[in-house]
Amino acid sequence: MTFKEEMEKEGERLYKWRSYIPLLFLLLLPIAFKNGEFIERTFGDRIGNLWEGIAFIISFLGFIGAVLRWDMCLRIHQAALIP
């Protein structure tokens, strides 16, 4: 199997299962509500800081992805205009 075929297969698999990933978080939600006091006592502010850090990293990666897509679109457009 070539690298291109392998990447296409991996992409199709990820695309197929992309809607199930948020369900994992829904499974953890009742546990967090049930054990909220224990989690707060055990981890305190560290868990809040970790959550904010994860949210920031996800947002930043999305921003970088948008910038790279925009840059790629500009390069394709410029390449199409150059004779």
Image (cartoon, rainbow, N blue to C red):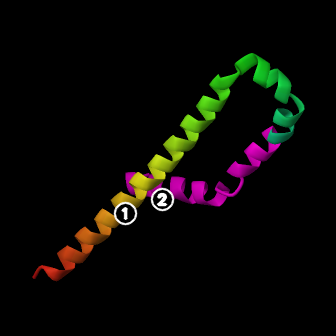
Q: Which residue is mark 1?
A: 69
For the residue pair 76 and 66, the one nearer the viewer reads as 66
Magenta residues? 1-28
> Does 50 lie within the magenta span?
no
Apparent side of residue 60 relative to residue 55 in the rendered image (left or right): left
Label 2 environment density (alpha carbons within 10 Å; few <14, some 14–19, many ≥20):
few
- Give coordinates of residue 58: x percent, y percent: 53, 46
- Give coordinates of residue 52: x percent, y percent: 59, 37
| Residue type beneath disc 1 | Arg
Which residue lies at the image location 64% right of the left edge and 56% below the top edge?
18
Apparent side of residue 21 relative to residue 60 in the rendered image (left or right): right
Name the main secondary structure of what is drawn in magenta: helix
Q: Which residue is mark 2?
A: 8
Q: Residue furthest top?
A: 42
Disc 2, disc 1: CB below 8 Å? no
> Does 26 lie within the magenta span?
yes
SS label for mark 1: helix
Which residue lies at the image location 50% right of the left edge and 41% below the top edge?
57
| Residue 2 visible from this viewpoint | no
On screen, residue 83 above or below 17? below
Quadrant of image for the C terminus: bottom left
On screen, residue 36 above or below 1? above
- Label 2 to label 1, Cα distance in Å? 19 Å
Which residue lies at the image location 57% right of the left edge and 43% below the top edge?
55
| Residue 8 visible from this viewpoint | yes
